[in-house]
């Protein structure tokens, strides 16, 4: 018996434009003082770094992932290559969990 072929999901690249997946919202819990991504029957608490990436990649002036990386590298005065690697890893993980979509 053979298994059906699986379709590999392409990695997120700097040319992609990211948005929150349908049904996912970014919300601040004032009681706990935490930002989170909320979806039906699940939530993900964001640390400061993840929040900065989500805002840069999905905000009203987001543009492409590469443009978000450029802004974050300037904002955090960090090497662009390191920022790009971290941003792409985080966004790929969030996409795989269904929180964002290219």
Image: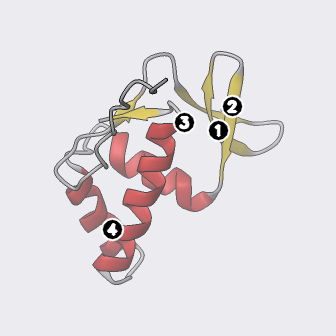
Q: Dot 4, how many residues are within 10 Å of its Cα: few (below 14), some (14-19), or many (20+)?
A: many
Judged from the image, the secondary structure of the residue bearing numbered disc 1 is strand
Judged from the image, the secondary structure of the residue bearing numbered disc 4 is helix
Q: Tell whether 20 sits left or right of 99.
A: left
In the image, residue 9 sits, relative to residue 49, either above or below, namely above
Q: Tell whether 74 sits left or right of 52.
A: left
Q: How many marks?
A: 4
In the image, residue 69 sits, relative to residue 73, either above or below, namely above
Q: Dot 1, how many residues are within 10 Å of its Cα: few (below 14), some (14-19), or many (20+)?
A: some
Residue contact at pointers 2 and 1, CB within 8 angstroms: yes
Residue contact at pointers 2 and 3, CB within 8 angstroms: no
Q: Which residue is mark 2?
A: 43
Residue sitting at x 48%, y 39%: 96
The image's mark for residue 84 is 4
Q: CA distance from mark 3 to mark 4?
A: 20 Å
Residue contact at pointers 4 and 1, CB within 8 angstroms: no
* Mark 2 or mark 3, earlier in chain: 2
> Which of the two marks, 2 or 3, is nearer to us in this view?
3
- Name the outermost residue toward the left: 15
Residue sitting at x 53%, y 25%: 25
The one nearer the camera, 90 or 32, is 90
**Residue 52 horizontal/vertical position (percent):** 48, 56
* Mark 4 or mark 2, earlier in chain: 2
Q: CA distance from mark 2 to mark 3?
A: 11 Å
Q: Which residue is mark 1?
A: 36
- Name the outermost residue toward the right: 31
> Which of the two marks, 4 or 1, is nearer to us in this view?
4
């Amino acid at each position: 018996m053979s298994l059906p072929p699986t379709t590999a999901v392409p990695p997120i690249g700097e040319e992609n434009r990211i948005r929150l997946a349908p049904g996912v919202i970014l919300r601040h819990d004032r009681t706990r003082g935490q930002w989170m991504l909320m979806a039906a029957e699940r939530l993900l608490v964001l640390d400061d770094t993840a929040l900065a990436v989500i805002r840069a990649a999905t905000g009203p002036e987001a543009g492409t992932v590469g443009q978000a990386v450029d802004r974050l590298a300037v904002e955090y005065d960090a090497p662009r290559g390191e920022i790009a690697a971290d941003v792409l890893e985080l966004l790929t993980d969030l996409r795989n969990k269904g929180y964002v979509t290219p």
